[in-house]
Image (cartoon, rainbow, N blue to C red):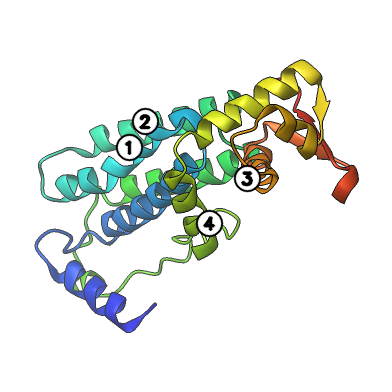
Amino acid sequence: MPDKSRKFHEFTLRSILFRGRNDWFFCYLKSERIAHVLSVLALSTPEGRLDLLADTAGRLPTDICRLAAGELDAAAILADVMGLLSSIRLSATKGFIHKEHAVILCAEYEYLAEKLVQGSHPSPFGSEEFSVPHFGLLEAPSKLIPTQKDVSDIKDKQKNKGQSGRAAAILDVLKKQKTASIKALAAVITDCSEKTIQRELGYLIEQGLVRKNGERRWSVYSLVEGS
């Protein structure tokens, strides 16, 4: 943990908000981290399919602070977590989130729920109050952590208005033609380069909507069954 972050954590654990509430402070940090991951997934998902889920996850850290401040009760926050779990599973069923990602995200929220319940019983021991908790499970698995390249790609995607429309166009072509190469797709989708179509296909593959068959110039793409 960087020194500045450690100092902030120590300060927060001594504050009136989280004093004696190590588990709730853990929940605050973990919920913020998961919300960050869901926001990145939402940005890379066409047509805003995960926007509501990401927004709901983004409100949870604030609500946990309000819980610690006595403005909300633990049952209400636990209900929010259970709702997020259901939303993630449903999004996976609809194909908006890759099933492997959904399993990881659900495991993170389930662990957060356990800590939330534990935090309902504050520690009476001063020595424990002022220690920085161990956040071994705070970091999301590496395949979900957005890299700088991921963020840059998403920013580039946002600059290109209508790129989500291209994703829909690609899916429409594959639905009609069953399989198509990048060149075949570019012959139909004429408002962008082959490189852009290749990048858009990459996003669709990550979301589990499209599969790639073959290598290099012989590569063709098709819809994943059930998409």
Q: Please indicate whether residue 114 sits to the left or right of residue 76 in the image.
A: right
Mark 4 → mark 2, Cα distance in angstroms: 21 Å
Query: Disc 3 vs disc 2: which is toward the camera?
Result: 3
What secondary structure is found at the residue carrying circle 2?
helix
Crowding at mark 4 (Cα within 10 Å: few <14, some 14-19, many 20+): some
Q: Which amino acid type is marked by label 2?
A: Leu
Q: Disc 3 marks which residue? A: 196
Give the image quarter of residue 54: top left
Crowding at mark 3 (Cα within 10 Å: few <14, some 14-19, many 20+): some
Residue 175 is situated, as x and y percent measured from the top left of the image, at: 73, 19
Residue 110 is situated, as x and y percent measured from the top left of the image, at: 46, 43
Crowding at mark 2 (Cα within 10 Å: few <14, some 14-19, many 20+): few
Q: Which amino acid type is marked by label 1?
A: Asp
Q: Which mark is residue 150?
A: 4
Contact (Cβ within 8 Å) of mark 1 with mark 2: yes
- What residue is shown at x 33% (from left), y 58% (from top)? 29
What secondary structure is found at the residue carrying circle 3?
helix
Q: Which amino acid type is marked by label 4?
A: Asp
Q: Is residue 141 above or below residue 15?
A: above
Crowding at mark 1 (Cα within 10 Å: few <14, some 14-19, many 20+): some
The quadrant of the picture occupied by the N terminus is: bottom left
Query: Disc 1 vs disc 3: which is toward the camera?
Result: 3
What secondary structure is found at the residue carrying circle 1?
helix
Q: Please indicate whether residue 114 sits to the left or right of residue 179 in the image.
A: left
**Which of the two labelled residues, at mark 3 and mark 2, occupies the earlier sequence position?**
2
As rendered, which of 16 and 157 lies closer to the eye? 157
Residue 162 is situated, as x and y percent measured from the top left of the image, at: 48, 33
As rendered, which of 1 and 174 lies closer to the eye? 174
Whether residue 227 can be seen here: no
Q: Disc 2 marks which residue? A: 52
Mark 4 → mark 1, Cα distance in angstroms: 20 Å
Q: Disc 1 marks which residue? A: 55
